[in-house]
Amino acid sequence: MRLETLLPGAAQGETLKLSAPISFWGGVDPKTGMIIDARHPERGQSIAGKILLLPGTIGSSSASAVLLELVHAGRAPAAIVMPEPDAILLLGLVVAREMGWSTPPAYKASVSQQNALSARVHIADDGTIN
Amino acid sequence: MLTQEEQAIARGDRGDGAAMAMRIVAEAARLMGAPRLIPIASAHIDGALYHGDSGTLFAENLVEGQAKVAVRATLNVGALDLFGCSRQKLPPHERDMAKRMMRAYEAMGCEPSWTCAPYQAGHRPQTGTDVAWGESNAVVFCNSVLGARTNRYGDFLDIACAIAGRAPDYGLHRPENRKATLLIDLSDVAPALKQAEAFYPVLGTWLGLNAGTDIAVIDGLQGFPNEDNLKALGAASASAGGVGLFHVAGVTPEAPDAATALGFQKPQRILKPSASDLARAHDRLSTIATETIDAVAIGSPHLSLDEAHALESLLQGRSVKVPFYACTGRHVIRALDESGRRKPLEAQGIIFVADTCVVVTPMLPDGGGVLMTNSGKFAHYAPGNTGYAVAYGALKDCVESAVTGRLHRDESLWQ
């Protein structure tokens, strides 16, 4: 399988599949990467270092700021996989790259494609899964 | 996709800051599938609110690269009241970094408006112009009430567009994407409710929960809402849901009537909220059944001068028994100073908050309790951001409750 690349780069690690969309602002602790939204099913898990599989994003336009802060703090996911690109969350990665910080890649994958991924994956530069 | 001039800017012909901004705008355009960039008339920047040191470093990096905004750019709230009306409880490092961030945005040529209601502080782009605005309530007001065109610009992209003077051409910038597909029929709602200030945050909450990603036209409000009502409706709809544009038939500029707003097509969906639907949306705004309150906060979005005058009239010279935060912009504080109204209100116990507000930075009394508000947006964010439970009520009820220290609420409209 090969995922469409949104922001290029390779990644490997454990996958963390979120079962509900998340708002990064108010939903993820920018210092630790812990999911803190009291109503979120994966509350208490950390997104740091994970291949983060998102069913979608919701909420505040400050999601980009939270993601940039996670990158700066070394607590960002290893990669972000989402069904559709968005102009808010991904901007955090675009800016991190401009700042010269080590920045995780992002890929596009539908929820059913995400479901086909195993618990630990390696994603090559071109989005190929192995 | 970029013009030769845009490519030259992205390579650094006008300095490192302008280059970084242009590359960020171009990346956003690529990600969203926009075929080109379009010129913008103005920007409203939500990115100067401190969420961590990285945002300050980004802004200072742009300043070091000599970046300046190419178009008029107002600033949304920051984490500090630099105007000096109120005090925030940020620890020293955070206070320093938040202040550096605010100063960096000013250094790029942004206007120190520090308000989430820039449209009531003299920043009103013309109908049909393209702009790049951030802050969900400002976005929905700009699109819906002013009829200017903006997507929801998040942190970083807002300032990048302001520096580049350009934005990606997609979404609500394109006229074909601004037509309503959802018809909201309010013909059965009682006129007494449509006249009530407290109706509009409730209608906005209901709309946010029910519209999804559809653009709605609301029919049946002709002759009722004033600008502050539309402001409250939009703010509540954008915090309870993801509304970026709505039309009100006979009221907003792209909706002389419902048919025009619908592009003369049949609506894909029609909703007619019942009295009990609206009562449920109203009940949802409060998180606690209570008889006492510990604080009141109004002004999300920031109070207009009219709303500040309404507060003064309702107080009738009486003092409040609980902390009463009135969040607004410098434009209103200055006007209140000029007419000699601010000092007497402060003597009655009103705490004016400029440049910021009670849900984006720590300032409410420690220990929590019950916060009463007339704002749908405060009602939405206060529990998570401040730890306070919320009691929602009209401005009149907020004032009476603050004067007596006990919850006073006229519920007759909702029964």
Image (tube, coloured by chain):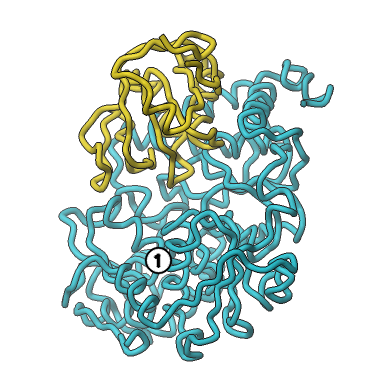
Choose between B135 and B331: the one closer to the eye.
B135
Q: Which residue is mark 1?
A: B376
Measured along the vertical axis of the image, is residue A2 above or below residue B384?
above
Circle 1 packing at 10 Å, graded few (<14), some (14-19), many (20+), is many
Measured along the vertical axis of the image, is residue A73 above or below residue B133?
above
Q: Quadrant of residue B331?
A: bottom right
The numbered mark 1 sits on a residue in which chain?
B
Which shade is chain A?
yellow
Q: Horizontal placement of B62 versus A125: left or right?
A: right
Q: Quadrant of residue A116?
A: top left
State the image coordinates of residue B233 (x, y, percent, origin top left): 50, 69
Q: Is residue B358 visible?
A: yes
| Residue at image point 55% right, 73% down | B184
Three-letter code for the amino acid on which mark 1 is drawn: Gly
Q: Horizontal placement of A77 versus B49: left or right?
A: left
| Residue at image point 60% right, 35% down | B107
State the image coordinates of residue B378 (x, y, percent, origin top left): 37, 61
Picture mark count:
1
State the image coordinates of residue B346 (x, y, percent, origin top left): 37, 70
The residue lying furthest to the right in this view is B4
State the image coordinates of residue A123 (x, y, percent, origin top left): 43, 12
| Residue at image point 53% right, 41% down | B154
**Label 1: which secondary element:** helix
Which shade is chain B?
cyan
Quarter holding the C terminus of chain A is top left
Q: Is residue B100 visible?
A: no
Q: Horizontal placement of B52 versus A119: left or right?
A: right
Q: Quadrant of residue A29?
A: top left
Choose between B37 and B43: the one closer to the eye.
B37
Measured along the vertical axis of the image, is residue B9 above or below residue B123?
above
